[in-house]
């Protein structure tokens, strides 16, 4: 059976019929309206959908490898389990999209708006999401090894149990986001805003958090060993039983932070501020950079193994 033409596709949609499992490779539908269409399991490799209207369109399990959706409107569309490898979503509107378990490997998501969407279990490996927006979205158990989300807006996003090893999150807005049990080992979160974020049991070993804002963040039981927290703001942060061994906290502000039972063994603490911090049971074995006055204060307030 020959492939449908763009005109035939539009006619099928206008008659409310399904295009399920149709072969639509390289179909040209740029600037067209396919809103509400059913493309379930359709094969749309390299489809041209730039600037198209896809509001509420069903792409469940569709193959959209190398598809061009630049500037397309996919508000409320269904992309569940769809294959979107190397697809172009630059400046596309995916507000409220349903993209559970979708595969965005290598996709271009620059300046895409995916706010209030559901991306649970999605794969963003090696994708490019600079300046993208996932504000209020759910990305639970998603993964994105090697992804680039620098300058993205993820305020109040849900990222529980997600995995982003060796990815780029420079200057990302993660204010009040939920990162419980998330894994960011080896990532660059320099200048990121994690104020009031929930990072309980988070894995941040070796993470760059230079000049990051972690004010009021919950970091209890988190692993921040060997992390770079130079000039970071940890004002009022909760770091109960947190692993900060061999971390660099040079010029970091820990004012009012709760570090009870945390480990700062071999940490670099040069220039740190401890005003009002809770250090009962905090371990300072072989830590470096503390002033004589700070050492006295730490011992007087319950710190353990403070260097002489």
Image: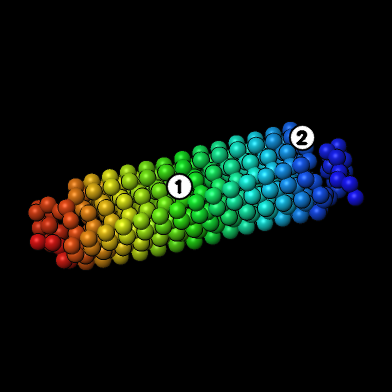
Q: Which mark is residue 109?
A: none
269 vs 282: above or below: above
Q: Is residue 213 visible?
A: no
Q: Position of residue 246 (x, y in %)?
A: 27, 59
Left or right, residue 153 beside residue 15 = left
- Residue located at (54% from left, 49% from top): 126
Q: Secondary structure at mark 2?
A: loop
Q: CA distance from mark 2 to mark 1?
A: 35 Å
For the residues carrying marks 2 and 1, which lies nearer the camera in this image? 1
Q: Secondary structure at mark 1?
A: loop
In the picture of the structure, the residue carrying the numbered disc 1 is 168
- Residue located at (77% from left, 37% from top): 29
Location of residue 285 (image quadrant): bottom left
Q: Which mark is residue 32?
A: 2
Left or right, residue 54 beside residue 13 = left
| Number of other residues with Cα within 10 Å of mark 1, as a class: few under 14, some 14 to 19, many 20 or more | many
Task: Out of 175 and 28, give the one closest to the viewer.
Answer: 28
Q: Position of residue 6 (x, y in %)?
A: 83, 38
- Residue located at (68% from left, 40% from top): 68
Q: Position of residue 95 (x, y in %)?
A: 61, 43
């Amino acid at each position: 059976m020959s492939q449908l033409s763009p005109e035939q596709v539009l006619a099928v949609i206008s008659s409310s019929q399904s295009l399920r499992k149709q072969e639509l490779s390289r179909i040209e539908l740029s600037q067209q309206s396919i809103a509400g269409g059913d493309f379930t399991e359709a094969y749309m490799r390299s489809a041209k959908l730039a600037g198209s209207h896809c509001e509420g369109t069903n792409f469940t399990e569709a193959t959209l490898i190398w598809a061009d959706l630049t500037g397309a409107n996919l508000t409320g569309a269904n992309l569940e389990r769809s294959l979107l490898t190397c697809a172009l979503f630059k400046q596309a509107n995916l507000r409220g999209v349903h993209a559970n378990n979708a595969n965005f490997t290598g996709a271009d998501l620059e300046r895409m708006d995916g706010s209030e969407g559901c991306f649970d279990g999605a794969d963003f490996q090696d994708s490019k999401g600079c300046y993208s927006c996932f504000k209020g979205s759910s990305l639970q158990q998603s993964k994105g090894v090697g992804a680039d989300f620098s300058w993205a807006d993820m305020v109040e996003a849900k990222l529980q149990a997600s995995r982003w090893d060796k990815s780029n999150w420079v200057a990302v807005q993660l204010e009040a986001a939920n990162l419980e049990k998330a894994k960011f080992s080896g990532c660059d979160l320099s200048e990121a805003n994690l104020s009031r974020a929930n990072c309980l049991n988070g894995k941040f070993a070796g993470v760059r958090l230079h000049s990051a804002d972690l004010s009021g963040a919950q970091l209890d039981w988190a692993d921040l060993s060997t992390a770079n927290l130079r000039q970071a703001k940890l004002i009022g942060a909760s770091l109960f039983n947190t692993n900060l061994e061999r971390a660099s906290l040079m010029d970091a502000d820990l004012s009012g932070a709760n570090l009870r039972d945390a480990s700062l063994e071999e940490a670099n603490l040069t220039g740190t501020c401890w005003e009002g911090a809770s250090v009962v049971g905090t371990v300072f074995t072989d830590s470096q950079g503390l002033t004589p006055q700070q050492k006295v204060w730490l011992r007087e307030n319950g710190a353990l193994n403070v260097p002489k």
